[in-house]
Image (cartoon, helix red, strand yellow):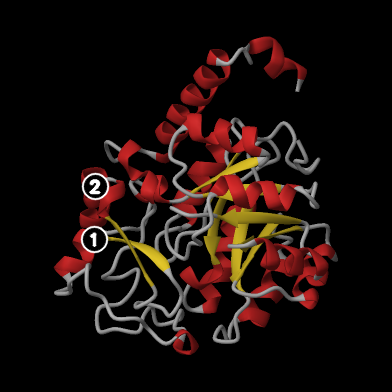
Amino acid sequence: MSMPAALAGRLSIPVIGSPLFIISVPELVIAQCKAGVIGSFPSLNARPIEQFEEWLQRLNRELGPNDAPYAVNLIVHKSNDRLMADLELCVKYKVPMIITSLGAREDVNAAIHSYGGIVMHDIINNRFARKAIEKGADGLIAVAAGAGGHAGTTSPFALIQEIREWFDGPLALSGSIATGDAVLAAQAMGADFGYIGSAFIATEEARAAEGYKDMIVESAADDIVYSNLFTGVHGNYLRPSIIKAGMDPDNLPTSDPSAMNFGSGGNTEAKAWKDIWGCGQGIGAVKQVLPAAELVARLKREYDAARARIGLGAAALAAE
């Protein structure tokens, strides 16, 4: 595996909890990291920016060297007028990992590298992957078909295979991963980490409406709709939330991609993330709302059982 040395021995299972807009807060991130997975949150979840600094102070205070590291997601799109101020705080508090989205910038990567931080960049195709590495990203997050939120359409098999033809650095896979079996499958394809988002929405620490959490528990892959209407970028959303907002999920108009709208949350009266709830296709595995630590424990049990089924038992684990 090409897992960075800074992460070796600090993870109970090779998982990154993806940054969930509005939903990921320090309580969730701390619970994830203490359970042994990388927890993350978008910097824009902390409003105003003074709260972002408070969150970083709290994470650095409450997480220690035996916990998994945390990550901050920075939106590198021109619509994010907070980018440079947030980046300055990330450098000040030496955030261990940065996840960049919607653009790749050499100056952002250089700033994170100045103190030894790691940059993972999320991409939806091989072309964007090459650009990200050329601009200095350390690793990639392959957002394949079936992922929650802004997702691609490429099969994870194809996407991972194409990237691994030329890139041997850290690689996470996103797309319908909600079980320990799926984490192991991601590794079998060539990824180093499973990138899990939707399953963590249905945890007690997540800042999501109870109706959102319940809808995830009650839904399955057939309840996911792929549309660019709500932000200008294609993403996966829960069908019942679209119906609840008074729209027909089978007859949604197409949005103008040039009208991308992330900061305020959408291009319609019903706002993405607030009213229209993002979710991936793997939610059929989510059966109840749990504390984050219990979800990670379940993932670990499933992961170990899957390894045992294919002959990778305790001896192989000890050899890693």
What residue does disc 1 label? Answer: 239
Q: Is residue 74 visible?
A: yes
Cα gap from disc 2 to disc 1, whole angstroms: 9 Å
Which quadrant of the figure contains the C terminus? top right
**Which of pointers 2 and 1 lies earlier in the amino acid sequence?**
2
Q: Residues within 10 Å of mark 1 (few under 14, many from 20)?
A: many
- Residue at the disc numbered 2: 219
Is residue 184 found left or right of 317 in the rendered image? left
Nearest the eye: 296 or 144: 144
Figure quadrant of residue 81: bottom right
> Front-most of 229 and 21?
229
Q: Residue placed at 27% from the left, 50% from the top? A: 222
Q: Is residue 47 above or below residue 38?
A: below
Dot 2, crowdedness within 10 Å: few (<14), some or many (≥20)?
Answer: many
The answer to whether residue 309 is above or below residue 284 is: above
Q: Is 233 or 68 nearer to us in this picture?
A: 233
Q: Is residue 16 visible?
A: no
Image quarter of residue 210: bottom left
Amino acid on which disc 2 is placed = Ser
SS at circle 1 = helix
Side of 75 where 46 appears, left or right = left
Which amino acid type is shown beneath numbered disc 1? Arg
Secondary structure, mark 2, is: loop
Tell me what residue is drawn at x 46 percent, y 79 percent. 262
Q: Quadrant of the N terminus?
A: top right
Comparing 82 with 103, the one in front is: 103
Q: Residue at x 47, y 31 (%)?
A: 299
Residue 178 rendering spot, x and y as whole percentages: 43, 40
Label 2 close to label 1 by CB (< 8 Å): yes
Picture layout, residue 258 above or below residue 270: below
> Residue 203 location, x and y as percent?
35, 45
- Which residue is drawn at the image coordinates 22% and 68% (left, top)? 249
